C-alpha cells in the first residue's frame, strides 16, 4: 500500500510502498478515502527536516542537553551513532483521516465493518487506529468535510478551556485552518469574535463566518482594535492559534484582555511571559493539549479505557463526535477551507505546495473510493529485493536465515547490525505498522518486509527468529517460535510471569524429545563484553567464594512509560535488572540458591519503587552479590560499575570502559569501550550455535534460572 513518509534528516517526502498494518486488540483497520494535510504541524516537520544539524539543535535545546549528557556517559562515537540513527528513521505523516472500517480488532465494540469513520490515522491507504481515536461520521457529512474532524477537535478543546459564555468577546489570533474553525465554533457558542492575521484572504473567510477582523499586513493595531471591539472593557478571552517563535502574540493577548481575562494557547509561540502583564489583571494562561482529555494517555488511547462520562464529559473521541454533529447541522462549514486536492500518488507535489510559500489552506489527499479491495491494499508481506534466491522458496529451514520480529531504535541501531556482522542471512523484518520493516529492511538488505508475525513463524525457510518487541509479547512469541522448531534469540526479558516461564520451559522440553532442542538465548550482552570475559577468565582460577558489588545508575523513566507498566513492560526490575542477575550468575559460575530485596520505602510521594532497589544473591559455592539498581541518580554519573573481591584481589569495571585489577599477577588494566562489542559477540555466539558450529552460549537452565529469580525479586517489592 502507499504511505506518505518524511525523512527527518533532509526533510524530503516520499510515497512509499509498505505492507498493510497489523490489526491489534482495541483497534480498527480503516481503508482511507481522504486525508487532510495539517498546514501547521506538518509544515513545521518539513521545515525541521530541511534544517541542517546546527539548526535542528537550536530548535530543540532540551534534546541537545540530553545528547551532551549521553556523550559524557556513553562516549562521542556511540552518541553520534544514536543521533544519526534517530534522524535516519522515516516519520509517518498525517493525523486527519477518513475511511471505511475493514477490520475490527478484539475488544472493540460500537463499530462494524463498513462504518465510515474519522480518525487520527496517517496518510496511508490502510491504517490501524485505536478505537478511542475514531468516530462514526453522520450521513449528512461528506468525506472531505469529515477530514477536518481532528483539526476541529483541536480548536474545540481550546474553546472548552476558555469556557466562553453567550455574548462574550473573544479574540482568535492566527487564522489558519484551526483558527478559522475556532471562529465558527465560537460564533456557534454565541460569542462576538475578533480575528487577527496577516493574510487578507483568511481575514475575508473569517468575516464570512461572522467575525470582525484586524489586518496586520496593513499595520492595524490589534490591541487598539480589541479595546474598541470590547467597548473599552477589554476582551473576555484570547485563543492563540498562530504558529510563531515570537513572544508577541502572548504579550498582545495580555494587553487585550480585561481584568481576570483568559488566554489559551492552541498553537505554538514564544513563552517568555511578562509577570507585569499578567499580575496586574490576574490573567489566567493555559496551554491546550491537542484533541482533548485522553491525549497521550496510553490507558485511554492504546488500551481503550474510556473515561466515565459523568466525570469527564468531553474526551478526544467525544470532541470528534461533537464537531461532526456541528458539521451535520450546518453550524460548522469547512468546505471553503479546501484549497488543493491531490491523489495520494502525487503527495510529494502536495508537500511542495505546503513548503513552497504560496497561498494554501486545506490540502486534501484522495485515495479513491472503489468498492473492490485491491490486493496491494491488504498485502502484509512484500519483497524488498528483485534478486531471486532459491532458498527463499525452500521448504527446509536455513539455519542462517533470520527473521526479526520488532525493529525499534535499539534493534535498528544495534541488534540488526550485530547479526549482519555475525553472518546471518537477513530474511524478513516484521513491525506492526510496516514503516519500520521497510526502512530497516532496505537499509540492511532484508529479503522481505512484513507486518504478519504468524506468517513469518510458519515460514519453513526461516531457521531463526530474533524477538525485539515490547516485553509483554516476548513469552508468547518465544513459545510459538519454539513450537515451530525455530532457534530463538529474545531480547530481555524472557517473560513477565512464572506462568509464562513454565510454558516456555515446557515448549523447550518438548522439542528436546525429538533430539537437540532449538537454541534459546536471551540478549544478555553484558556477559559477552570483552572486559567481562577477561574477568571470567581471571576468576576461573579462584577457588574460594567471591563477593560482587554492582552499582547501576539506571536513570529515571517517567511512570507513564510503557516499560513501567506491569502489563506491557513488566517494570524495570524484570525489564532491565535481569541483565545484572545474569552477569553475576555468569561470573560466579554457580547456581543461585537464595535472594532477597530491599526497595525504597513505601512513603508519600514515592510511586514506582521497583527501580530503586538493592538485592542480594547467594550462590551455591558460597559467593554472594549485591546489586544496587537505582533510578534516582544523575545522568552525568557513570551508568554501571562492578567490583569483585576475591582471594585478596579486586577487579573494578567502570561503565564497560575501564577494567582495573588490584593484586592480580600479570594483569592491571584493560581499557576498551565495549558496549556494542558485547552485543556483537552475543549475536555471533547465537549464530554459531544456530548453525550447529558450537553449543548454546548460555545453557537453557541458566536462562530459566535468571528469569525465575528476577520475577521473584520483582514480586517481593
Image: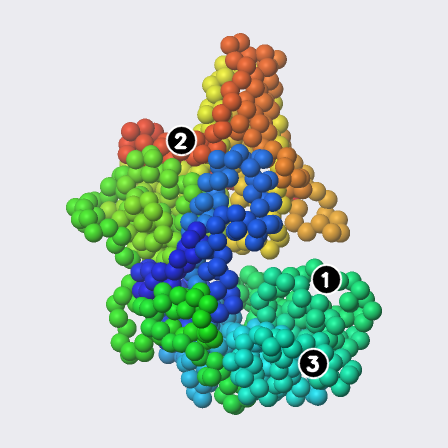
Instruction: Name the residue at 60% across, 50% down.
Output: 61
Residue 575, position in %: x, y?
A: 53, 44
Q: Quadrant of residue 189?
A: bottom right
Secondary element at image label 3: helix
Residue identified by numbered label 2: 681
| Left or right, 465 with reference to 361 | left
Instruction: Name the residue at 76% across, 86% down.
Output: 231
- Circles 1, 2 touching at the beta carbon (< 8 Å): no
The quarter of the rendered structure image containing the C terminus is top right
Question: Could you give the CA–CA distance between mark 3 and mark 1, rounded to whole angstroms?
Answer: 22 Å
Q: Nearer the viewer, mark 3 or mark 1?
A: 3
Name above or below for residue 486 compared with residue 345.
above
Q: Nearer the viewer, mark 1 or mark 2?
A: 1
Say whether residue 599 is visible. yes
Instruction: Name the residue at 38% across, 73% down.
Output: 365
Secondary element at image label 1: loop
Residue identified by numbered label 1: 273
Name above or below for residue 534 compared with residue 466.
above
Question: Could you give the CA–CA distance between mark 3 and mark 2, rounded to whole angstroms?
Answer: 70 Å
Name above or below for residue 165 compared with residue 5.
below
Secondary element at image label 2: helix
Q: Can you name the residue that lies furthest to the top here?
A: 665
| Left or right, 395 with reference to 209 | left
Which is nearer the N-term, disc 3 or disc 2?
3
Instruction: Name the residue at 67% across, 66% down.
Output: 248
| Left or right, 690 with reference to 577 | left
Residue identified by numbered label 3: 225
- Circles 3, 2 touching at the beta carbon (< 8 Å): no
Say whether residue 117 is visible. no
Residue 101, position in %: x, y?
A: 39, 74
Amino acid at each position: 500500500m502507499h504511505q506518505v513518509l518524511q525523512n527527518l534528516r533532509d526533510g524530503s517526502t516520499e510515497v512509499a510502498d509498505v505492507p498493510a498494518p497489523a490489526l491489534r486488540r482495541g483497534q480498527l483497520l480503516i481503508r482511507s478515502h481522504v486525508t487532510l494535510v495539517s498546514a501547521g504541524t506538518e509544515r513545521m516537520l518539513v521545515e525541521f527536516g530541511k534544517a541542517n544539524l546546527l539548526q535542528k539543535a537550536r530548535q530543540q535545546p532540551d534534546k541537545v542537553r540530553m545528547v551532551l549528557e549521553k556523550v559524557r556517559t556513553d562516549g562521542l562515537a556511540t552518541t553520534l551513532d544514536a543521533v544519526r540513527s534517530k534522524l535516519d528513521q522515516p516519520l509517518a505523516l498525517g493525523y486527519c483521516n477518513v475511511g471505511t472500517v475493514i477490520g475490527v480488532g478484539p475488544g472493540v465494540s460500537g463499530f462494524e465493518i463498513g462504518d465510515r469513520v474519522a480518525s487520527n490515522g496517517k496518510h496511508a491507504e490502510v491504517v490501524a487506529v485505536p478505537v478511542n481515536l475514531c468516530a462514526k461520521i453522520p450521513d449528512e457529512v461528506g468525506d472531505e468535510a469529515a477530514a477536518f474532524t481532528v483539526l476541529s477537535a483541536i480548536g474545540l478543546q481550546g474553546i472548552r478551556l476558555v469556557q466562553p459564555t453567550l455574548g462574550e468577546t473573544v479574540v482568535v489570533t492566527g487564522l489558519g485552518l484551526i483558527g478559522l474553525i475556532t471562529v465558527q465554533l465560537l460564533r456557534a457558542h454565541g460569542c462576538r469574535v475578533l480575528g487577527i492575521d496577516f493574510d487578507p484572504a483568511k481575514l475575508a473567510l473569517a468575516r464570512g463566518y461572522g467575525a470582525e477582523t484586524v489586518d496586520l499586513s496593513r499595520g492595524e493595531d490589534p490591541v487598539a482594535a480589541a479595546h474598541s471591539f470590547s467597548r473599552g472593557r477589554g476582551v473576555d478571552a484570547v485563543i492563540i492559534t498562530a504558529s510563531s517563535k515570537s513572544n508577541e502574540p502572548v504579550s498582545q493577548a495580555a494587553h487585550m484582555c480585561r481584568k481576570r481575562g483568559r488566554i489559551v494557547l492552541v498553537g505554538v509561540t514564544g513563552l517568555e511571559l511578562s509577570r507585569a502583564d499578567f499580575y496586574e489583571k490576574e490573567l489566567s494562561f493555559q496551554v491546550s493539549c491537542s484533541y482533548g482529555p485522553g491525549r497521550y494517555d496510553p490507558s485511554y488511547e492504546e488500551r481503550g479505557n474510556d473515561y466515565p462520562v459523568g466525570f469527564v464529559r468531553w474526551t478526544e473521541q467525544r470532541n470528534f463526535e461533537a464537531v461532526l454533529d456541528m458539521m451535520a447541522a450546518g453550524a460548522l462549514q469547512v468546505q471553503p477551507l479546501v484549497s488543493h486536492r491531490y491523489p495520494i500518488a502525487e503527495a510529494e507535489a502536495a508537500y511542495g505546495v505546503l513548503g513552497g510559500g504560496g497561498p494554501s489552506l486545506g490540502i486534501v489527499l484522495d485515495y479513491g473510493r472503489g468498492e473492490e479491495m485491491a490486493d496491494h491494499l491488504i498485502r502484509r508481506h512484500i519483497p524488498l529485493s528483485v534478486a531471486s534466491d532459491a532458498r527463499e522458496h525452500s521448504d527446509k529451514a536455513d539455519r542462517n536465515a533470520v527473521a526479526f520480529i520488532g525493529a525499534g531504535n535499539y534493534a535498528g541501531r544495534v541488534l540488526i547490525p550485530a547479526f549482519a556482522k555475525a553472518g546471518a542471512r537477513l530474511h524478513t523484518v516484521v513491525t506492526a505498522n510496516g514503516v519500520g520493516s521497510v526502512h530497516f529492511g532496505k537499509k540492511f538488505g532484508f529479503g522481505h518486509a512484513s507486518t504478519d508475525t504468524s506468517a513469518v513463524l510458519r515460514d519453513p525457510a526461516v531457521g531463526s527468529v530474533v524477538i525485539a518487541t515490547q516485553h509483554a509479547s516476548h513469552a508468547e512469541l518465544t513459545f510459538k517460535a519454539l513450537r515451530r522448531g525455530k532457534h530463538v534469540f529474545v531480547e530481555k526479558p524472557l517473560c513477565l510471569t512464572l506462568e509464562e516461564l513454565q510454558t516456555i520451559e515446557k515448549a523447550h522440553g518438548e522439542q528436546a524429545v525429538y533430539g537437540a532442542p532449538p537454541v534459546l538465548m536471551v540478549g544478555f550482552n553484558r556477559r559477552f563484553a570483552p572486559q567481562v570475559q577477561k574477568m571470567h577468565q581471571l576468576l576461573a582460577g579462584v577457588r574460594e567464594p567471591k563477593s560482587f558489588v554492582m552499582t547501576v545508575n539506571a536513570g529515571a523513566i517517567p511512570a507513564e512509560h510503557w516499560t513501567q507498566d506491569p502489563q506491557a513492560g513488566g517494570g524495570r526490575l524484570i525489564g532491565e535488572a535481569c541483565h545484572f542477575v545474569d552477569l553475576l550468575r555468569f561470573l560466579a559460575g554457580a547456581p543461585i540458591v537464595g535472594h532477597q530485596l530491599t526497595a525504597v520505602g513505601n512513603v508519600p510521594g514515592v510511586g514506582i519503587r521497583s527501580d530503586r532497589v538493592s538485592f542480594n544473591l547467594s550462590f551455591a559455592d558460597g559467593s554472594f552479590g549485591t546489586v544496587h539498581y537505582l533510578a534516582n541518580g544523575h545522568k552525568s554519573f557513570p551508568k554501571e560499575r562492578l567490583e569483585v573481591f576475591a582471594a585478596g584481589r579486586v577487579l573494578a569495571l567502570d561503565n564497560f570502559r575501564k577494567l582495573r585489577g588490584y593484586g592480580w599477577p600479570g594483569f592491571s588494566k584493560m581499557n576498551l569501550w565495549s558496549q556494542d562489542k558485547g552485543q556483537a559477540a552475543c549475536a555471533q555466539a547465537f549464530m554459531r550455535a544456530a548453525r550447529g558450529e558450537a553449543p548454546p552460549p548460555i545453557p537453557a537452565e541458566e536462562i530459566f534460572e535468571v528469569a525465575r529469580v528476577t520475577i521473584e525479586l520483582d514480586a517481593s517489592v
